[in-house]
Image (cartoon, helix red, strand yellow):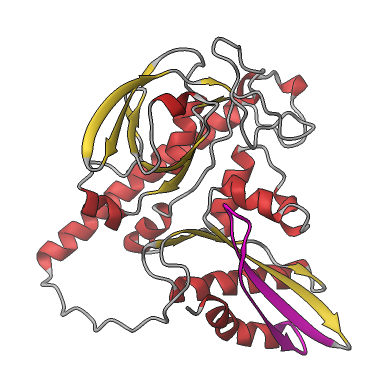
Amino acid sequence: MSPFLLLAWLTLPPAHAEGGPVVLGIHWAEITESKRAKLGLPTAGIKITAIDKKCPARDVFESQDILQRIADQDIKNYSHYFKIMRGTPPNVPVEVVFYRDKERRTATITPVANITKHDRNNNYGAWKCAAPGTPPPVSLAVRPKAELKGGDKPMEVEMAADHAELAAEEAAAVAAEMEAEREATNPPKAAPVPVAQTASIVSDGRLAVLEFRGDLKQNERRLLSDEARGAVVGIVSSDVSVMTRENMEVMLSDQGIDASCVSEGACEVETARNLGVDYVMTGEIGNLAGTYVLSLKLHEVRTGKLIAATSAEGANSLELKRVIQKTVDELLAD
């Protein structure tokens, strides 16, 4: 793999919804690089889209604020914010830096314990703010191995993941330096003529394509799901961030959520909310009189509203693969 492809792979943006043992009580959206530049922010941070009125955030933030720094750490993205909060003790005031209408502001906020339990293993997937001073439930990150259950991670596993992330950041920096040297020694080529994109009903935000479910084998469904993600990337603008399967699996694993739930169909809306996305595309494959029918749906996650739906037919998985691009284009067409 070339260093430039490696750089692109390493910098795919992960995403997380607030749901660890310590919370502020906010919903947020990622700040894309283009938006960061337009706003003149030093780092990306996260955009606050909604606030729980029963949580500490209500006394400090407003919707549309850009949270840029917390607990003496600049926020890089969703995943980084999630890790900062996991390392922040409850009921201890911390300083935050945020922007409101491009004006830099500072304040002090006191995170509180999350007293919502997501499933039978006490894994966190949502939040309910405890009263100030309430100690948090026992964190999964510090429980003895003997107490860990099926989807939980011991401390050393999480530390290994952190080390791997640091190594990835260093590799990305090296690749960036190599790219800069290459540009310095080779004159830039004329910019290609941009290809006109189909106008899409999704113009910005984050979008996830969940794994298709239905009457085909799992490996065939995974292939069709990936084809759909590729088709979405080719249709929407650069202001729309499309999650990869790997992003979703890592994020769900960090929250202790069973990834197999994504393909069962019973928790699609809940899964999308835990992913922190604005839109979710789902697909179901059925067999009608020997013909496979792929049904695609697009929902707005915040309201659960069905925005668009379409379908395609094929005698087998290969024929469905051939019509994925056209079908996704029809689903997202404005």
Could you tell me which residue is drawn at 74 percent across and 59 percent down?
263
Q: Nearer the viewer, residue 213 or 92?
A: 92
In the figure, 177 relative to 191: above or below? above
For the residue pair 2 and 222, the one nearer the viewer reads as 222
Is 160 included in the stretch rendered in magenta?
Answer: no
* 72 relative to 189 in the view: left or right: right
* Horizontal side, residue 324 vs residue 146: left or right: left
Residue 137 place in picture, x, y as percent: 66, 18
Q: Residue at x 76, y 75 (%)?
A: 285
| Quadrant in which the N terminus is drawn | bottom left
Is the magenta region chiefly helix, strand or loop?
A: strand
Looking at the picture, does residue 138 appear above or below residue 173?
above
Q: Position of residue 126 (x, y in %)?
A: 63, 36
Residue at the farthest right position: 289
Relative to the observer, which residue lies in front, 21 or 80? 21
Q: Is residue 224 above or below residue 258?
A: below
Q: What segment carries the magenta color?
A: 291-318
